[in-house]
Image: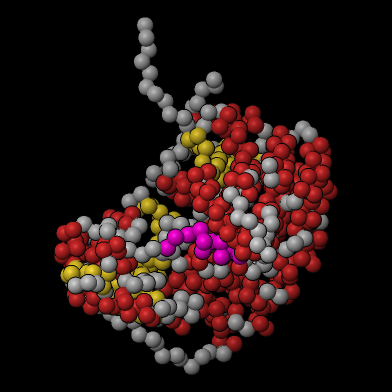
Amino acid sequence: MALVRHTVVATADDVPPDRDDWLADLTSDEASIRRRAARALAEMPDAVPVLCAHLANEQSLSVRSIILTGLIVHKSAAVVNGILPLLASEDANLRNSAIEALQQMPDEVAPHVETMLTHPESDVRIFAVDVLAALAHPKVPEWLRHVVTNDPHVNVCAAALDALAEAGEPDAIPALEGLAERFWDVAFIRFAVDAAVRRVRGR
Amino acid sequence: MDMITAPKRNPRVLVVEDGITMRMFYRDVLEGAGFEVEEAVNGLEGVERAMTGSFDLLVVDINMPKMDGYQVIRTVREDPALWRVPVITISTEDKEQDALKAYDAGANFYMTKPVRPKDLEEMARLLTGTAIK
Amino acid sequence: MTIPLAQPETAISDEEFAKFCEFFYRKTGIMFDAQKKYFAGRRIIDRMDKLSCPTFREYFATIRFEASGAEMQRLVNQMTVNETYFFREDYQLKALVAGILPELAAGRSRGKPIRLWSVPCSSGEEPYSLAIYVLEYWPDADRHDIEILGSDIDSAILADAAAGVYGERSLQRLPPDLIRRYFSRVKDRGYRISEDLRRSIDFSQGNVVDPQFMRRFRDIDVIFCRNMLIYFDDRSRRETIEAMYDCLSPGGYICLGHSESMSRISSLFQPRKHADSIVYQKPAR
């Protein structure tokens, strides 16, 4: 009893399954088997469409996580195309995971930003702003300024304003002050613009 | 006759919200109402803080990374140490089914953004039994 | 080009420092307060100097908008102190024996070992600390088989771990009776941990981002992964946490370092409170 030593050994590799085997495993009832399949498929660039399609139907957070990690590594236009629709998902976890993944792919997301920010639903525009809030792309401040100046919905503007507090430069101040004028009767906006201007100005 | 009253500590509120200016706003309103405020920037951190702090009120945003507000409330309600803490949820949604979803998860009150300072203050006081000064 | 080293108080305004703190906190979970301004400020200015950034604003734009995240990583390295010694962050060892082990033992059939994994184990202080703490402070230790594994990428440091010799500084948190019980003095070199303990830990060399290495570890009950992930980039961090998820038994636990936060890494694990500490649990199903 008490401390027992057990030597961890390397296991011999089985004959590696092929792509079709992995695709079959992706539909297994066992999450651990699906995880293993997702890991293997994530290494194959031509499996991107299959993985994206599977994501929408995958219920296990652990499998989703592995698929997304793999897709982020591929970082291609196809990946972004596959993940973007998930922003409109009713599944909060899936949506959040999609937002996080998109945040990791600034150059690939950039061509889509304008479309995302003009989506007819204000919630989806908010999620688009959430992507920008942690996106490492030099045009982020410009995109956010545009939202603050033009978006009709107060909550979309609030999200953009929040992101600008961190990412904005002093040239954002006119847009921020314009927002405070536009929503002069919303206490939160007045407060937040004030805070954002201080942050952006640096004093 | 002198009344000897026990020293009261300020009620403690945890604000769980990923937006910095929103957190600052809630802090401003709630500190002004006499609360001690702590913050968490996403749902998972919110649950951690709730478990290790001892709060009289939670203010929980619905749309957050890592764990959304509904999940935060459900987790808190399942925790024997936390299940009675009052929770105000705050959402961008304005549909009846979202309010129902919040109450279903165990929220005490549901508010939509942008939140009015007076509304937040009143509800915070009401839920914690804090008198108006 | 060199810029004169400015004082943190003047080079970085309070407002700018607040913005920096919020950014750093959002990304890492590490909070600086006003008292740490000098410490953090000094390190920021060092980095500004190395990158020839004349203003804080320019430096902040670098860490905010650099796609690779490389400068942020370097900054994190500068901001965190990593020292290893026995019973480091012992509040987690307390959570282990007061909460985690009793819970795991309750559902455990006799003969099925409880497996603890220290990774990175560095020069061995952590796995040996686990051994000592469990033997000393878990009343049921004798009724179970406990396996302790230690892994590190660095084979030289693993050799040190296997040798088990430590200086005074490393033992400073150990009560004298434990030192007497588990160590013997080695002339001019310090203290050597008992042969029994040295032989009871299984040390292995490998890289946590190597799937083949990680596949060796299964049915682990508790992983101590402290003060490693903070130094990883986002991709490696995700891959490692996902791999560790598979290493763990259902209901198994992972313990991170005090300056690390699972809430910045992954939502796969559930927070649990044991002995006033938060540790993370893989769902039972």
Decide whether the magenta segment is chiefly helix, strand or loop.
helix
The quadrant where residue B117 appears: top right
Q: Is residue C74 magenta?
A: yes
The quadrant where residue C160 appears: bottom left
Residue B132, given in percent of the width and then of the height, sits at 55, 21
The quadrant where residue B26 appears: top right
Question: In the depicted view, which residue is nearer to us: C34 or B66?
Answer: C34
Can residue B24 be seen by looking at this rendering? yes
Residue B113, given in percent of the width and then of the height, sits at 68, 41
Work out whether C226 lies above or below B21. below
Q: How many marks?
A: 0
At x 37%, y 9%, the residue is B2
**Left or right: B102 as drawn, with respect to A118:** left
Q: From which residue to which does the magenta span run? A: C71-82
Q: Quadrant of the C terminus of chain C?
A: bottom left
Residue B12, given in percent of the width and then of the height, sits at 48, 35
Looking at this rendering, what residue extends furthest in the top direction? B1
At x 75%, y 62%, the residue is A138
**Left or right: A127 as drawn, with respect to C280:** right
At x 81%, y 45%, the residue is A175
Work out whether A156 lies above or below C88. above
Q: Quadrant of the N terminus of chain C?
A: bottom right
Which color scheme does this rendered protein use?
secondary structure
Question: In the depicted view, which residue is nearer to us: C113 or C241?
Answer: C241
Looking at this rendering, what residue extends furthest in the bottom direction? A15
**Left or right: C39 as drawn, with respect to C276:** right
Question: In the depicted view, which residue is nearer to us: A89 or A149?
Answer: A149
Q: Is residue C77 magenta?
A: yes
